[in-house]
Image: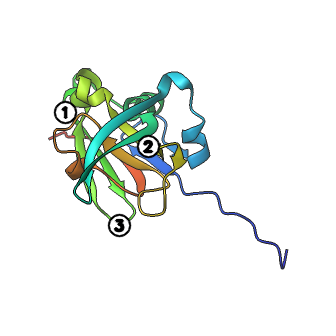
Amino acid sequence: MAGSAIAAEPAGIRVDGQVRQPLQLSHAQVSAMPAAQQVTSTTTREVDGQARSTTVRGVRLRALLEQAGLAERDRFDWRKTVVVATARDGYRVVFSWPEIFNTEGGAQVLVVHERDGQALGSVDGPLALVAANDVRSGPRHVRALERIEVRILRE
């Protein structure tokens, strides 16, 4: 099709590792997830010396992990499981499975697809991960999220 431009679908994410059902989700699939799995979070941060509010919309990480399912061999594997979120540039952050499923903070870990009513720009997106309840959100903010890996830490 010479001469015609085809818009590329923004990159998506993989959810894999020690899961029952690995997932490959496009940006559109994440954005279209049911409203019950979507969360809007407003935070205030300092930008250029001024406090600014920003609102992000995304899917709870918990919802994606529930869809993939933990490939546990015994009933206590969930206690020793970590979730590693990786950016396109290799930046990684870690959450424990109990943190995500048993704390209010874990309920606010979001795979974000929208900021202030707009799709994420090229710096942050197309998908990002935000731990909205972290006291310092920067260290566990993953721009250009590409992979969520589940690891059960066994001997």
Q: Quadrant of residue 112?
A: top left
Residue 93 visible in the current orientation:
no
Q: The disc labelled 2 sits on which kind of residue?
A: Val
Q: The disc labelled 1 sits on which kind of residue?
A: Lys
Check the image and name the residue furthest to the front: 50
- The residue positioned 40% from the left and 63% from the top of the image is 88
Mark 3–mark 2 CB contact (< 8 Å): no
Bin the neighbour count of mark 2 within 10 Å (Cα to Cα): few under 14, some 14-19, many 20 and up.
many
Residue 139 visible in the current orientation:
yes
- The residue positioned 41% from the left and 39% from the top of the image is 55
Relative vertical location of residue 21 with respect to residue 74 in this rendering, above or below: below
Q: Quadrant of residue 82?
A: top left
Q: Nearer the viewer, mark 2 or mark 1?
A: 2
Q: Which mark is residue 68?
A: none
Q: Position of residue 107 (x, y in %)?
A: 32, 27
Q: Secondary structure at mark 3?
A: loop
Give 46 or 61, whichever is nearer the viewer. 46
Q: Is residue 139 left or right of residue 10?
A: left
Q: Secondary structure at mark 1?
A: helix
Q: Which mark is residue 112?
A: 2
Q: Quadrant of the C terminus?
A: top left
Give the CA distance from mark 2 to mark 1. 26 Å
Give the CA distance from mark 1 to mark 3. 27 Å
Q: Which mark is residue 89?
A: 3
Q: Quadrant of residue 59?
A: top left
Give the CA distance from mark 3 to mark 2. 18 Å
